[in-house]
């Protein structure tokens, strides 16, 4: 006599996984409900250390799989339009539009969603939070429209049952700020959260003065967590 299988198979989620606080904490937030697949991108960014951290945290978080996708050719297409890939532009200490990489999340999500459809996953997540309102491709209006476009692009497969309908999820969509998201990551990861990489620069130590480092410091302060990150300044 066959014994009925009681346990339910966990739903799959693909997470855009940079090695920074936001994406790591997003995984920590989702890991109880989803089998997680991480995807990281080399797109010509100065901060290559984030990929090293992504590899490390993929193991810590127990991701089912972790892909690193090389799209470094985008650096040539971007030219000097943004400070994150250009060797000529300086990275600012506070937000200005020079740190917006043209449609970066759209590119990442296109590739991540193609993988998600192939895995029969139901969710694609990236770590945009309510503090990212300065970035158009982090806002819920963008994620909602691109979700609709992706599902329309696979509508016949979805209707036939070959594909699962995809939800594009962000902490922003759930009303989470960077500090609230950080708290959730800290609850799961403890002190290892300090090993995430936020800095827009490369090097052994995070600079402590770029816009991203300053946002990191502010998030720890707002979350009431003593920041044990090592900064140059």
Image (cartoon, rainbow, N blue to C red):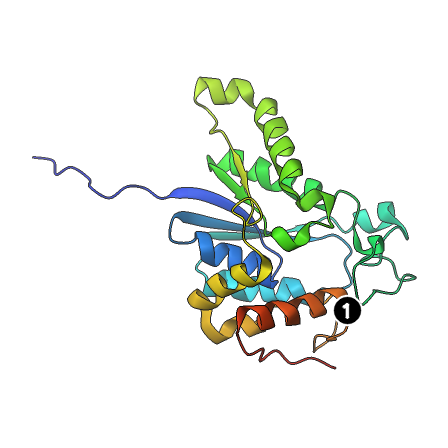
Spot occupied by residue 135 in the image (x, y as percentages of width and height): 73, 48
What residue lies at 50% left-to-right and 49% top-to-bottom? 37
Image x and y of residue 5, in percent: 19, 39
Residue marked by disc 1:
210
The part of the image, by quadrant, that contains residue 115 is top right
Q: Quick check: 122 above or below 28? A: above
Nearer-the-camera pick, 15 or 180: 180
- In the picture, measured across the screen, residue 81 lies left or right of residue 143, that is right
Image quarter hosting the N terminus: top left
Identify whether 191 is placed above or below 16.
below
Q: Residue at x 65, y 36 (%)?
A: 141
- Indicate the secondary structure of the residue bearing disc 1: loop
Q: Is residue 9 visible?
A: yes
Q: Residue at x 79, y 59 (%)?
A: 95
Relative to 158, is 208 on the left or the right? right
Residue 114 picture quarter: top right
Q: Residues within 10 Å of mark 1 (few under 14, many from 20)?
A: many
Percent coordinates x, y for residue 152 in the rendering: 59, 22
Q: Which residue extends farthest left?
A: 1
The image quarter containing residue 44 is: bottom right
């Amino acid at each position: 006599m066959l014994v009925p299988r009681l346990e339910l198979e966990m739903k799959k989620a693909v997470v855009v996984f940079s090695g920074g606080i936001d994406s790591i904490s997003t995984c920590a937030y989702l890991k109880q409900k989803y089998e997680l697949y991480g995807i990281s991108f080399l797109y010509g960014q100065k901060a290559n250390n984030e990929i090293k951290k992504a590899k490390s945290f993929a193991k810590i978080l127990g991701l089912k799989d972790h892909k690193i996708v090389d799209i470094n050719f985008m650096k040539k297409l971007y030219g000097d339009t943004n400070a994150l890939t250009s060797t000529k532009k300086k990275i600012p200490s506070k937000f200005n539009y020079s740190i917006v990489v043209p449609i970066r999340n759209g590119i990442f999500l296109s590739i991540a969603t193609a993988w998600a459809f192939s895995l029969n996953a139901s969710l694609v997540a990236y770590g945009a939070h309510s503090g990212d309102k300065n970035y158009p491709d982090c806002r819920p209006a963008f994620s909602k429209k691109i979700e609709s476009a992706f599902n329309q692009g696979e509508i016949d497969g979805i209707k036939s049952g070959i594909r699962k309908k995809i939800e594009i999820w962000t902490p922003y969509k759930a009303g989470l700020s960077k500090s609230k998201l950080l708290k959730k990551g800290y609850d799961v990861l403890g002190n290892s959260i300090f090993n995430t990489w936020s800095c827009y620069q490369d090097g052994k130590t995070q600079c402590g003065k770029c816009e991203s480092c300053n946002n990191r410091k502010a998030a720890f302060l707002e979350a009431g967590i003593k920041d044990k990150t090592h900064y140059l300044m």
